[in-house]
Image: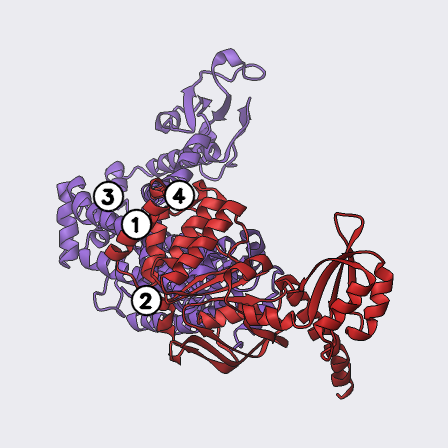
Chain colours: A red, B purple
Amino acid sequence: MNILEINNVSKSFSGHQALSDISFNVPEGCVYGLLGPNGAGKTTLLRIINHITAPDSGSVTFNGHSLNAEDVNDIGYLPEERGLYKKMKVGDQALFFARLKGLSKAEATRRLHEWFTRFGIMDWWGKKVEELSKGMAQKVQFIVTVLHQPKLLIFDEPFSGFDPINANLLKEEILRLRDAGSTVIFSTHNMESVEKVCDHITLIDRSHNILTGRVADIRSEAGKGRLSLTFKGDGNALAEALMPLVEKDSMRRFETADPDVMRLRLKMLPETLTSQVIDTANRLVDIESFNRDLPSMDEIFIDAVNRHNLPSLPADVTSKNSY
Amino acid sequence: MHRFLIVVQREYMERVSKKSFIISTLLMPLLMIALMLAPVLIQEATTPEAITLGVVDTSGKIFPRLQSGESVKFVEMAEVPSGTPETDDNIDGYLVITSDLITKGSVERIDLILNSTSNLKFEQEVTSQINDAIETERLLEYNINDLPKILDSVKCDVSLNIMRLDREDNDSMPTEFSAIMGIIMSMLLYFFLLLYGIQVMQSIVEEKSNRVLEVIVSSIKPTQLLTGKIAGIGLVAITQIMIWAVCLFVMSVIVLPTLLSPDMMTDIQAMQAGAQLTETADVELVSAMATITNPAFVIQLFFWLIIFLVGGFLLYASLFAAVGSAVDNIQDASQLQTVIIMPIIIAMLASTSVASAPNSAFVSWLSMIPFTSPMVMMARIPFGIPVWEVAISAVLLYISIFGAIWCAAKIYRVGIFMYGKKPSIREIVRWISYK
């Protein structure tokens, strides 16, 4: 079942198109990555999901019904631009946010004590936020976000501002929350964390959804026909011989730590058989290793954004001329 | 609990539990008293020392009638000192009075030789005493029997006890007293509107620059947050004024009567009951005291004060809120803030002119226009303005509040997500029309 369905959502601000016709579904119980360069429209989309702004067109379905104001009690949101009241005491502040999310004072107090004890920060309760370090404040912020045990958790750039140790702690907490039954959406630039944590992703670029699906599927799809081999011998001759078998300009040669050994990455033409490549290579060079080449999410990201940007340029020109 | 109330509660508790609130609640009345006493003290401090004046009175009739006072000290001298007055004579100057002066029709000019600077009060004192003495002497020349007795019995000091036909209670406070009451109340409003209006603005800017706003709006609608904030801060203002009001009420209705003399209390009660006063009463003081120790009057005045205080606060708080939501930091706010403070200052200046003409067209209009009406109307009320006029002004004020809060909420909704460039007033106005 999908906990969240985004259907043809568009939004513009005074002439600037922030989201155009975005659609995707978030299955319950997964970790969903929302990726995209800065200014792509991720934060706007997250604000729509949080019922902070309304879309110009399209709809959002939450847990089987159209998203409404009361649903915010089932959503926990950690915005990219986040902060706490500096002059307010940590405990009072956490209670305030918890009560805004619909928890009773007694219940909120009980849960906060649990979390504070688990994080070993009970002695911060009476301190003012301005007395805490940035990392400490981030911990409090995280607790406040998840305290009301929301069905859907949304983290906008959660790792920014965290040191590696705390970032790792946060990652573990996110996975723990997923295992406890929450669905997690997070937007990030950190592609490594996407590979490790996310089950599904959607890639937004310049207001458009340009790639969506399961991380495993996306990677194997992008890796289709891609090979990587390391070898000793005449690289030029090998490249020349492989030319008719591979996609134009898909071959890349890399140095390795061993000066005699070279690495070659390529993408085969659809009709090429892997055995043809192996045979050719075997004839000309001394093969050290040979394997399928799964691209990293980084590469997929950059590749998808580049592919999206190139054809759009002439389109812009024609649309301008048509006026 | 409703989210709105949670916000109200936070805004209220965070403020009233602060040390600064407690201190300002205690210090403000002291400050007010100090401000009122300051002119008296300054005058006291600047009163010049008495000038010692030697009098050579060849007529022998004038000097006995001269009385030394604060600004002048008269010393009799047998003869004109040779040359300039010396310091060892212990006099600052001298004048000569001859019998000719008493004779009618002579040149009424006296040479006063002075060794130091003169001052206005000293000169007035000297001339009026000498005039009085000469006038009395001239009257004596007519040889009227029992003249001193006659003079005493014709002395008169009229004070006006104003009866208003247009009012049911057909009496009113002395004008001077009304003016003081009016000024105090419009000053109070001035302080509150600025102090608490700016707090609303600061609070919004703080949330925005802390980025705590992004977190809150995922739980609560911006409009609820804004109105909750204004309500919370407004309640703080009301709490503060209630504390003062209770103190003042206790002072005027309970403490003040015990401090006044029993005679005066009888007069005051007589006046409150509409009866005749005893002959010796100081009418102005008694009627002033009768008014401020009258619970009905105090409560009525307080009622209007709260109406206009709350109304004025809501109006200005929403304007300050609009400014706060448009900027990222308090420095950027100063320019936009000036636009809002302007009408408050105009109202304050107009209030001080109310005393000279409480019903002039200028102040009447200002007491109807919502931006200036709270202060100007409060300055006018002690002069006895018809209730319907006050009511219309209040209704106009409260209608305009709805408009102001609606606009502020629109601006707020857009403004809180705007960071970076400081918007112009035109841009802010355009935000109102955003969907």
Are discs 2 and 4 both within one chain?
A: no
Q: Chain of mark 1?
A: A
Q: Residue furthest bottom?
A: A322
Taking depth in this image into account, of A275 and B71 the one nearest to the observer is A275
- Label 3: how many Cα within 10 Å (few below 14, some 14–19, many 20+): few
**Mark 4 = which residue?**
A128
Q: Tell us which disc is closer to us: 3 or 2.
A: 2
Q: Mark on residue A114? A: 1
What kind of residue is marked 2?
A: Ile
Q: Mark on residue B153? A: 3
Q: Which badge, 4 or 1, comes first in the chain's sequence? A: 1
Q: Tell us which disc is closer to us: 4 or 3.
A: 4
Instruction: Please indicate, yes or no, whether residue A319 appears anywhere in the rendered image.
Output: yes
Separation of marks 1 and 2 at Cα, in angstroms: 63 Å
Separation of marks 2 and 4 at Cα, in angstroms: 51 Å
Q: Chain of mark 2?
A: B
**Mark 2 = which residue?**
B385
- Label 4: how many Cα within 10 Å (few below 14, some 14–19, many 20+): some
Residue at 46% x, 73% y is A26
Q: Chain of mark 4?
A: A
- Secondary structure type for disc 3: helix
Q: Tell us which disc is closer to us: 2 or 4.
A: 4
What kind of residue is marked 1?
A: Glu
- Secondary structure type for disc 4: loop
Q: Tell us which disc is closer to us: 4 or 1.
A: 1
What kind of residue is marked 4?
A: Lys
